[in-house]
Image (cartoon, grey):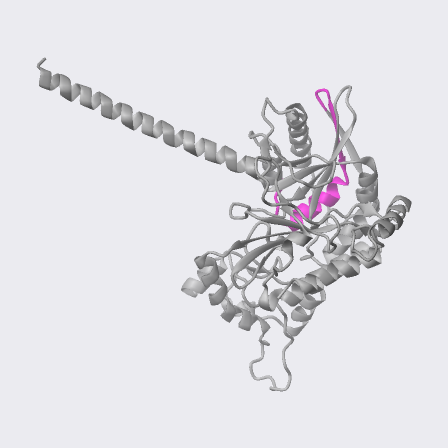
Amino acid sequence: MDKRSDLRLCHFGTARRRRWWGLRRRWIYIYITFTFTWRMLGVFKTNQEHDLCSLTCLMKEGLHAVLQTSNNTTVPDKLSAEHYKSAETQVHKDLEMQTFAGPVFAGLRRSLDITEEEYQRSLSSDGCYLQFISNSKSKADFFLTNDKRFFLKTQNTREVAFFLSNLKAYMDHLEKYPHSLMVRFLGLYSIQIPNKTKKYFIVMQNVFYPDERINTRYDIKGCEVGRWTDPASTGNPVTKILKDNNFEGKHIILDKQRSWLVDQVEIDSAFLRSLNVLDYSILLAHQPLHQDELDRKHSFSNLSMHTVKPMDQDSPAEEDPPTIPLLEGYSARLASDTIDSGLDHVQNTGEHSGHGIPLQEVNRTDAELLEFQAHHRRLLPNLKNSVHVIDGPKLRYFVGIVDFFTVYGVKKRQENLWKSLRFPGRAFSTVSPATYSQRFCQWVKDHTK
């Protein structure tokens, strides 16, 4: 073989090595970036090196067994008092799993269009749970399912007892106001591991799902003392949940949808006041709307006009049809029974695909509109987490009310007295439920446009 051939082979081998090392460096960069991003969000895989790996694996295994059994159970159309008190125990290997008020939560999942199969798939997928670490003062452990759709949060016995005693009231509130901003709890369980303390945990919807474009989150209580988080600290693997004082000077820009949000917060906080609780929060985040989402909002305004017009176009001019705030600007369904994803086909082609409804059928009768208003419904975006999503003119907001298990009992009354002396004239969180509710609602009014 001559020198020229040797040079060609050498050059070929060098080029292949360059391509290989370039590809390797690229994959290393992607892996490091992905891992760093998750760490910056305070989300960690509970893999074999994680302290809570054993617990989360057993939780997932126990839930898989429990849900496999419940999938074959028919959800009752009407719930009885016994359903709310039910506590089913199931032994799986060495684990003892308990499901509390199973039929109640199954009915709630069904009302949210969450099938038992996808609920089970999310909670017992092959991937590890993700531990969520934040600067919250809560001593509970937080986990995310691998798809980030559901949160699992450990609860103490007092919180479990309080929630179960008020579960009927909670469900009644959601039935009356199906678009309530209160977080949806989807299941309550306990796990008994041999030689370990029994752990209770609750499954809830992730208010910030999907979160791919969210980079700032807030926890709002409507007060000032202790409500600042330093957003600039680095090197800390904790999700920075910003607070009230971080939000000063900013506003939630909703335009025509502001009145709905303000009213719904008042409705939800009045319910929480009736439970004698305080210290609940609004979880808040936002992300820019993509251009295609903005286009859909604008094109949908014509449909909104159809929705508020009466069926009889010849009705007298002085008989104005009932108007509903928030009809303009949404591109999805009217409650759970009006508009679904098939609407795109109707708008684009004028034909009915079989999955949506013809455009003319969106016209509502006066009785239906009044019922729509009575339940304080709104047009929901076509998302799996739609009750917690509200679109403004330029931003999509994620809003949910969480952490409503703190009762204003003797301990909190004493804390209120101490803080009154410690912070005279300042707004702190430990106040009576009536004061807390009023201040909570006022914050929303003052910070929305």
Q: Position of residue 25 (x, y in %)?
A: 37, 29
> Which residue occupies 47% across, 61% down?
294
> Which residue occupies 63% across, 69% down?
325
Q: Nearer the viewer, residue 86 or 9?
A: 9
Q: Nearer the viewer, residue 236 or 301?
A: 236
Query: Does residue 445 lie above or below 247 as drawn?
Result: below
Image quadrant containing the C terminus: bottom right
What are the residue bounds of the magenta stretch?
92-116
Query: Does residue 136 lie above or below 382 as drawn?
Result: above
Query: Does residue 97 lie above or below 328 as drawn?
Result: above
Q: Point out the residue furthest to the left here.
A: 2
Q: Position of residue 159 (x, y in %)?
A: 80, 40
Q: Position of residue 393 (x, y in %)?
A: 53, 64
Query: Does residue 376 lie above or below 309 as drawn?
Result: above
Q: Is residue 352 visible?
A: no
Q: Nearer the viewer, residue 231 or 274?
A: 231
Q: Is residue 114 magenta?
A: yes
Image quadrant containing the N terminus: top left
